[in-house]
Image (tube, rainbow, N blue to C red):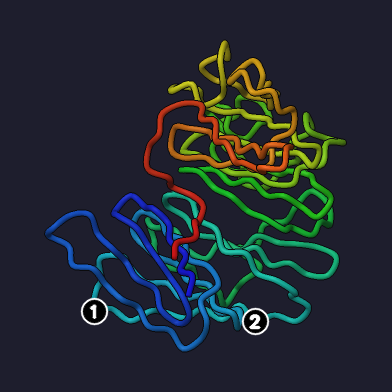
Amino acid sequence: MLALFQMTWFGWISFEGHRVALYFSTPSQSDDIIELDDEVVHVTCTHLHVGILLKNGRVGVRRIDDLDGKVEMLNMEEAGVENRILVSTSRQMFVVLVHKGRSEVLRILDDAVGIENLKDKLKHRIAFPWPVKIEQAAAGHDFLIYRDSTGNLFSMGTGTRGELGVGLVRHLDEPVHIEQLAGIRISKVVCGGWHTVALTAAGDVYTWGWNRNGQLGKDKMITEVYPILIDPLEEFNCPEENVDDIEATENSSTIIVKSTDSKNEITKYMLGSDTVPINGFHLIL
């Protein structure tokens, strides 16, 4: 059976079936297994808490270091909700509630105060600029990027390093549309610590944010506050024009290209340093 794993600041997390495993890189911390009563769909974590989305729509939350602690289950049931997307920054956790004709962001946890009181859910709801159907959410240390069904991107959170793609802003409490990509259909978005990488349906790649380790490409500013196009030929001397996939780690961006010949070979090209991934799950056998 295939298991999914995610590298984290404390080690890594894996899940399959009804089980989540926490593996710690420090010898002083024991590994931990969390058993759930339903199939696990997704797992994420802040600096202090792990969040677990179940197939039945509920979300379990527990402190990472509370090995004997009980997982607190949050009921995300709500009329008209078609899908739920769990995502977290380094200190906050959110659930995107996707309705038939609209989506909302619900903040469920802040490391500074713990689990939010969701009895008054309206207090913690965050709306989008217009009715959208969100299909993907990605996050860095203190910012979030959302992709809707038409390929639009929205960003919120801290923007002091340009990671929001809407200029140099201190903080945005609600999602805003990344207008510089208007009319360009985005098929996937990934986030590093303080930068973002977006793949278009046409196979182009845009990056923006902090370029401390060269993760945005050659001859780019230390901070790019708006999306900039990556040229694979210029960056890697790659003859293939279209990119098939993208990845991001703390301080790197990777584009994945499949050859157009019968060999169908896959080549990965990296920008920046190869550090431990903080976002994105990978398949292992």
Residue projecting furthest to the top: 219
Amino acid at circle 2: Glu
Q: Quadrant of residue 58?
A: bottom right
Q: Which SS class for mark 2?
A: loop
Of the residues tagged 2 and 1, which is closer to the observer? 1
Which residue: 50% across, 57% down?
A: 281
Please tell me whether residue 1 is drawn above or below residue 191 in the rendered image.
below
Quadrant including the C terminus: bottom left
Q: Which residue is mark 1?
A: 68
> In the visual, does 17 lie left or right of 67?
right
Tell me where residue 259 appears, x and y as whole percent. 68, 37
Tell me where residue 120 appears, x and y as whole percent. 60, 73
Amino acid at circle 1: Asp
Please tell me whether residue 143 is drawn above or below residue 78 in the rendered image.
above
Q: Which residue is mark 2?
A: 77
If you read the primary sequence from the N terminus, does the residue marked by circle 2 or circle 1 appear first? Answer: 1
Q: Quadrant of residue 213?
A: top left
Q: Which SS class for mark 1?
A: loop
Residue projecting furthest to the left: 28
Tell me where residue 13 appears, x and y as whole percent. 37, 62
Q: CA distance from mark 2 to mark 1?
A: 27 Å
Q: Nearer the viewer, residue 176 or 138?
A: 138
Across the whole image, how many numbered discs are drawn on residues? Answer: 2
Tell me where residue 84 appears, x and y as whole percent. 65, 69
